[in-house]
Image: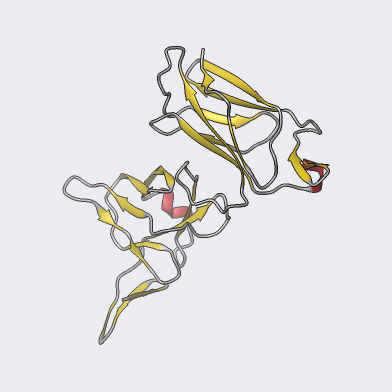
Amino acid sequence: MKVSHNYILFSGREITRKVLLVVALTDRYTGSQPSGDPDVFINTKYKPMNAIRNPSGYYVFTRLPEGEFVVNVESPHYFAEQKTLTLSDLGGLDTMNPVFDIILEPNPSYPFPANATLIRGMVRDTQGHPIPGAQVEITGRKNGTQTTRKGEFVLFFNKLSEEDILLEGSKKFVTINGEKTIHVKAVHNSASGTLEIKEVQEGKTTSLPAPIILK
């Protein structure tokens, strides 16, 4: 079976079904289609409506619930995404190409390449319990992430310019506003915490020496 524009074609015969929604997934690390085969579905009262993945990597829905519905995206390598839509929201899409874009955020189990520049760490409360769903970012950069149920996180650098790099001998270090010291901040509800990293080497994984403690 293949999906061709607004119709689904079956070998041996042709059955036409209007495509109501096409979901395009983008991996935020690579900027291309995600690795693996994420599950894309809409929960209903009786059973989920599963999208059909076409050969081009798009996820197609030929049926949609009435009123408000939630598009779910789940994958072992990405944080789950949920986008709430209504049929009226789709009115702004091209009826001949009704594509809705969703960007997927890699989680700590993502298969980063060996030469990726990463910061890995944990976020905990003052009692040492992991904090899931905390927002984590590097001060001075726009890229951020969140923590898993175990309080784990991974931050990545994938668009470094010459101005972001400090060369010391044969080693290259990431800089923020010209400074080699990097501050990682975590926030959850009204609590926050920051940890300082003396250096992050390009092409290496830097693990925080201690958890970020939220207070």
The image quadrant where one finds the N terminus is: bottom left
> Can you give x and y, in whole percent of width and height, for residue 118 in the image?
60, 41
Question: Looking at this view, is 36 or 39 the one in front?
Answer: 36
Q: What residue lies at 65% left-to-right and 48% top-to-bottom?
A: 158
Question: Looking at this view, is 20 or 141 the one in front?
Answer: 141
Q: Residue 183: name its quadrant.
A: top right
- Is 33 displayed left or right of 4 in the figure? right
* Residue sitting at the far bottom: 12
Q: Residue 171: name its quadrant.
A: top right
Q: Residue 132: name its quadrant.
A: top left
- Is 159 displayed left or right of 15 in the figure? right
- Is 110 displayed left or right of 84 in the figure? right
Question: Looking at this view, is 208 or 183 the one in front?
Answer: 208
Q: What residue lies at 44% left-to-right and 46% top-to-bottom?
A: 78
Scheme by which the image is coloured = secondary structure
* Residue sitting at the far left: 46
Question: Looking at this view, is 11 or 138 the one in front?
Answer: 138
Q: What residue lies at 78% left-to-right and 43% top-to-bottom?
A: 165
> Can you give x and y, in whole percent of width and height, for residue 64 in the image?
29, 55
Q: What residue lies at 35% left-to-right and 74% top-to-bottom?
A: 7
Q: How many marks?
A: 0
Does 197 sit above or below residue 165?
above
> Can you give x and y, in whole percent of width and height, for residue 77 in the image?
43, 48
> Can you give x and y, in whole percent of width and height, for residue 52 in the image?
33, 64
